Image: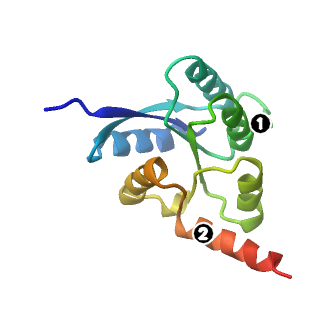
């Protein structure tokens, strides 16, 4: 049996149960040509540290970002969008995917303009199949959007037509 490549994923979300869910689902999924290892970060600062470290060593293949990263101890205004902008600078080859409960077209389109992610998933539409499909799509032929994210993009595009 040959050793499969390991795809490294960083999941950043202030809700630990969410990141643990991504971790257990993806690490248990059967992929054809690779295995998945997921690391988690519960705050902007921890995510930033892990991204900075990966820029000097083994980078993450995919970084999953929640938009809101509010720490219970601080009034930190920094968001997953800020972390996405930083990741684009430090690890430009890492694929970025936003995982958020926000599905409004202005917020999503703002993220597309500022970060240009390889994917966007509306949390209410995430399940085991969509998570696995997202990883395969983002690695091989991005982008990947859930139906709600795609509908928001289409709504925004239709309002831009003059």
Residue at image position (53%, 64%) is 146
Q: Residue 29, image x and y in percent?
A: 29, 46
Q: Residue 73, image x and y in percent?
A: 71, 28
Q: How many marks?
A: 2
Image quarter where the N terminus lies is: top left
Residue at image position (68%, 25%) is 45
Visual colour scheme:
rainbow
Report which residue position mark 2 lands on.
150
Viewer-proximal residue among 53 and 27: 53
What element does badge 2 sit on? helix
Quarter of the figure with residue 106: bottom right
Report which residue position mark 1 lands on.
78
What element does badge 1 sit on? loop
Using a 10 Å C-alpha cutoff, classify the residue at mark 2 as few (fewer than 14 neighbours), some (14 to 19) or many (20 or more). Answer: some
Quarter of the figure with residue 4: top left
Residue at image position (71%, 66%) is 104
Viewer-proximal residue among 90 and 15: 90
Mark linked to residue 145 = none
Nearer to us of marks 1 and 2 is: 2
Using a 10 Å C-alpha cutoff, classify the residue at mark 1 as few (fewer than 14 neighbours), some (14 to 19) or many (20 or more). Answer: some
């Amino acid at each position: 049996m040959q050793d499969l490549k390991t795809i490294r994923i960083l999941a950043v979300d202030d809700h630990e149960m969410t990141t643990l869910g991504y971790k257990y689902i993806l690490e248990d999924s059967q992929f054809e040509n690779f295995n998945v290892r997921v690391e988690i970060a519960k705050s902007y600062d921890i995510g930033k540290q892990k991204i900075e470290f990966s820029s000097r060593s083994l980078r993450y293949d995919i970084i999953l970002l929640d938009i809101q990263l509010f720490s219970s101890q601080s009034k930190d205004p920094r968001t997953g969008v800020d972390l996405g902008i930083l990741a684009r600078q430090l690890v430009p080859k890492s694929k970025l995917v936003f995982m958020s409960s926000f599905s409004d077209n202005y917020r999503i389109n703002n993220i597309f303009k500022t970060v240009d992610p390889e994917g966007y998933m509306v949390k209410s539409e995430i399940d085991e199949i969509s998570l696995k499909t997202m990883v395969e799509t983002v690695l091989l032929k991005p982008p990947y959007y859930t139906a709600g994210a795609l509908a928001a993009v289409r709504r925004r595009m239709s309002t831009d037509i003059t």
